[in-house]
Each structure stands twice: as C-alpha cells, then as structure tokens.
Amino acid sequence: MAKVVIEALVARFPGDVYDPYEGAGGDDCAFVQKSKIVEVCRFLKTDPAMAFNMAPYITAVDYLGAEPRFEVVYNLLSTAHNHRIRLRVKVPEADLELESVTTVWRGANWFERYCLDMYGISFRNHPDPRRLFMYDEFVGHPLRKDYPLRGRQPLVPEREVKDIFRGPGPVGRD
Amino acid sequence: MAIEEKGLGERDTGAAPRSAGERPFEGQHRPETYDGPLDAPLGGKQMVVNLGPSHPAMHGVTRAVVALEGETIKEMKLDIGFLHRGFEKSCENVTWGQCFPYTDRLNYVSSIMNNVGFALAVEKLCKLDVPLRSKYLRVATAELHRICDHLTLVAAMGLELGAMTVFLYGVEARDLIYDRLTEICGARLTSNYVRVGGVSRDAPDEWVEKTLQTLDRVTELRDTIDALLTRNRIFMDRTRGTGVMSREDALDFGFTGPCLRASGEPYDVRKSAPYLVYDRIDFDIPVGAHGDNFDRYLMRMEEMRQCDRIVRQCFQQMEPGPIVVEDLRYVLPPKPLVYGTIEGVMAHFKLVMEGIKVPAGEVYSYTEAANGELGFYLVSDGGGRPYKLGLRAPGWPMVAALPHMTKGALLADLVPTYDSINMIGGEVEQ
C-alpha cells in the first residue's frame, strides 16, 4: 500500500521528507520541508510508480501557540494505484509563503485560495491570488484561532462598477 | 441501456447516445477558420456580463462575470461566497455531536450522506466500530438520499433546458422518498439522522415495505423522465458535446464522483475503499466515455438504478439488532438509565455539556457522496470539540473548473454545464 510510497519518498528526499507515521485508520503520512513541497509533489505526480494524479484536498490548520504555528496539509490520491498519502508542511508565522502546487495539479487553485482567505497563507506563482469566500475588504482571516467569535465588520462602500453596456469608459461619463 | 429495447423504429444512429464515431453536434468550440465571406466573423468588441448572483440558472447565489464576444465566452470568472456561513468556524466551537445539524446544511438535498461522512470521520479517529444494523440503515438511507440528489439534478437540468414536465415528475419522485425519510428521521431535508456510534432511530414498523413500494413508484417516474429526456432532440442538442472534460483534465482538476466517471475514469470510493457494508453489496459503477454534459446526465440516471439495487439488497440483508454502540463515552444512555442511575446521569451530563472525548490526533476521512468525494479533515486535541474541521466539499473542484469548461463555448452552453456539475451552494460555499 501507500507505505511503500512514503518509504520511497524518505529515501529519495532524505531530510526533506521526515517523520513518516501511520495515522488513525491506517493513513500514511509524512512531514515535508516547506521549500521542497513542489519538488516532492512533482515527483509524486510524474513518477510512474507513484502516479499521484489528483490532489483531492488541500487545507491548512492553525496550531496557535505551537511553533511553527501553521500547517498546510496535502491529501493526495493516485487513482491508478489506489494510493492515498497525506503530506504536512509546517509553516512558521514569520514566513507565511509557500510555493503553489497549481503547476502540478490545476485543481489546487481554489484550495490554495481558501488557505489564503481563511488563514492568510499565501502561495507564490498562484494564477489567481484572490480571496475565495470573503469579500476583498474583509479584515483578518476567520479560521485563525485568534480571530474573535463575536463582533461585526463595518459595511464597505459599494465598489465602482464598469458600465456593462458600453464597456469601460472615462470616469464620470454619465 | 434500456433505451435500445423500446422499439423506436428507425432511429437516427448519429443521435443514439452510445453510437460510436463522429458526433454531429460537436458544437462547443466555434471553428477558428472561416471559409466563405458570408461566414466571416462580425467585428465586435468584448462585452462583460454579470450573471447572477441571483440569476435563476445560477443555483443558489453565485456571480459569474462573463466576457462575451458575440455569444462566445472568452473568459469567465466566478465569484462565490454569498452563501458562506462559516461552517468550519461554527463546528470548531460546538461539541462533536452538535456538528451533525451543521453537516445537514452542506448538501441540503442529500443530508444523510453528509451525516454519514462526518460520523465515519469521527469514528475513524475514535477507532470505533458500529453495529451491523446501523451500517445497513446508514447505507440504505444514504442511498435513498443519493436518488433524491440525482433526481434533483436531472429535474433541474430538464427545467432549465425548457422541460418543465420533467421537473414535476422529478419532484414528485423526490418527495415520495422524502416522505419515507421523514418517517425514519423526522425531517425532509435536515435529517440529523446519524450519530457517532450508530444512528438515532430504528426503522419504524412496515417502513421497509413502504419504502419498497415507494421505490417501485420512483422507478416508474424515473423511467418516465428517461423516456422524456434521454432521446429528446432538444435536450441532446444542448448537452452533447458541451462542457467537455477530458479524463486527464478531470483528474488534474480534482473531479470526483459522477463527473469524474463521466470522463472515463472508473474511480468510486465505494469500490476502491469500501466503507460500511458496500463490500457486501453487489452494484455497478457506470463509466462514461465523452465527459460531456450528456454523459454526466447519463451517469446520474444509471446511478439511480444502482442505488435502487443497493437499497433493496440492504433491506434483504438487514437483520434486527442494536442500532448504536453500547458505550456511554460516545452515545447518550437510554432514558431509564438517566433517570434511574447516577452513572446514567453522569454520562448524559458529560456528553451534553462537554461532548464526546475524541482522542487527540488528525485524520482525513472520505466517502462517496452524491457529487463525489466528501472528505472531512479532523484535528482533535482530545477535548469535546473539534480543533479543526476541514470540509472537502464534493462540488468544489467542479465549480472551480467551470471557467475552464466553458471557455470558448456559447453562453447558452453555460446553463447545462452548470446544471450537470450540480453545484450546491450549501457545500461549496460552506
């Protein structure tokens, strides 16, 4: 099963893939160094013995109080071999930027936007680095553990909308 | 397929759903080269159109900003989040048991599947095995809800392509199933049926017989819909060859469920990593060939037949027995115990006030929901509340891939594409 994958990863990227363990329910997991995640993912996708052709879920966790504080979790799937592994990347609060894996799996796009929106973790070379659920003027990242549960954000003024009938024109044309 | 046997006389072989070779309506992409002067493209400037957020064809509230050149979509951007209600944040601040009503509201058409997915995730973390009868009840009710979900999709797809009749048949069939589900769990949509360690109620008397009768009627209605849509010229013209997703693209974009299988990848969590009692049940996985809207529609029609088989087999194999584990750490004690013994009161109090103590750790659990893989990434710190609850909504990658699927297509193709990926605002926007 997927234990072979983790062993191969540790052998190929010594030091960069570390602390492999078997999670609850027999999931195979490992930690990956932040700077190597794209390299590891590309190897997993292109190597025919691995063939991880899908990234079903990428998410982030805020371990407030721990150091490093954040973690990005990559759940990967190979439909050809029916393997699943989970890679965890520790992200310190001081350097909240990772390389985007959208170059490996295009489906990672919205998952990374979600991490940006909810945790403030940004991704280099992301094709569309916007917030996913919240509006642009929203202050803060709601799923961080120190985000207050109560309170309101002020209403924001309406955005300038281009004239959808006549296309973009000079400001104040109407 | 059953269509072949209906004796439709001389059929246009080019229009048969499974006909091989060239398809006459490969109409998604407009030809780039023009032959005659009459076909020369009219010079036009791009027009940016806002579709939604409350357009009737935009299920729920989604805003699509479409850059049009004539009728062709040059670019499209999606703006979601109008239905965002902080599902994950809410769940992180209530006990594990209180999360179930929140999961109902994810895919509100098939809520028991969400319940099952969440319960399995917690049980995976607790290493808890549930009684056999509750497994069968979970599978049977979840598959009934899968029929509801697919019926909704097919009905809405018909409605939005102009076939109101189909919608009425679909809703009639769906409400029959909802009636049966109301009898077992007390609500049509927000079922809240599954618990950590089992299910909340056993099937009432004669429920199985009534459900079998309902399934017979649903089969009739489904066949009516099949006869109305599957060989319908207008429906086929609008759906065949539109919203095409190749197998590689579908995998790359993270498609799961019927949309992935329509593209030709035979992957189903129920087969590749069987959970509950799916390994004891005989059912097939339909796989498509073209990955277009019509194939995605056919997937749903065939899966409904398979769901029917699964539910009937569940009823045959199901035997009387307990429906929850008898472990007071996870399940509320029966009321005589609560009112009669100090242990019962204590267990009840601790479960209600503090919640189930789930062992510290993290887990990713995945099930096959109606639209694809429903995943929960849970982190527990050993307390009564989830430290992190990550939802992998089945429809998420499909909606994310919509701009890719509709690029270069006609604006009218957006509607069937949007229908066939079955975007449910509740789960995608959390």
Image: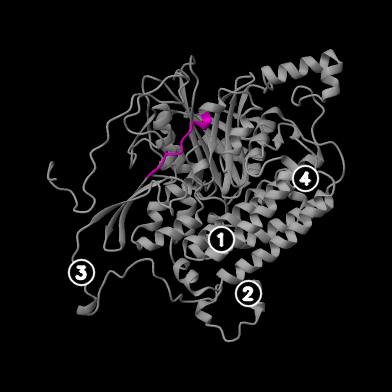
SS majority, magenta: loop
Determine whether the residue tagged by mark 1 lies in a helix, strand or loop. Answer: helix
Of labels 3 and 1, earlier in sequence is 3
Whether B358 is drawn above or below B77: the answer is: above
Q: Mark 3 lies on which chain?
A: B
Labels 4, 3: one chain: yes
Give how far apart the Cα atoms at labels 2 and 3 are: 42 Å
Give how far apart the Cα atoms at labels 3 and 1 are: 38 Å
Give how far apart the Cα atoms at labels 4 and 3 are: 61 Å
Q: Which chain carries label 1?
A: B
Of labels 2 and 1, earlier in sequence is 2
From this viewpoint, which residue is outermost toward the bottom?
B10
Whether B39 is drawn above or below B69: the answer is: below
Whether B235 is drawn above or below B204: the answer is: below
Give how far apart the Cα atoms at labels 4 and 1 are: 31 Å
Marks 2,3: beta carbons within 8 A: no
> Residue at coordinates 40% horizontally, 47% vertically from top-left?
B54
**Residue A5 location in percent, x, y?**
57, 40
Circle 3 packing at 10 Å, graded few (<14), some (14-19), many (20+), is few
**Residue B129 location in percent, x, y?**
76, 34
What mark, if any, has residue B3 been given in the picture?
2
**Residue B349 location in percent, x, y?**
73, 16
> Residue at coordinates 14% horizontally, 45% vertically from top-left?
A174
Residue type marked 2: Ile
Give how far apart the Cα atoms at labels 4 and 2 are: 32 Å
Labels 3, 1: one chain: yes
Start-end of magenta stretch: B79-88
Labels 4, 1: one chain: yes
Q: Mark 1 points at which residue?
A: B167
Tell me the quadrant of the picture where the N terminus of chain B can be found.
bottom right
What mark, if any, has residue B42 been given in the picture?
3
Give how far apart the Cα atoms at labels 2 and 1 are: 21 Å
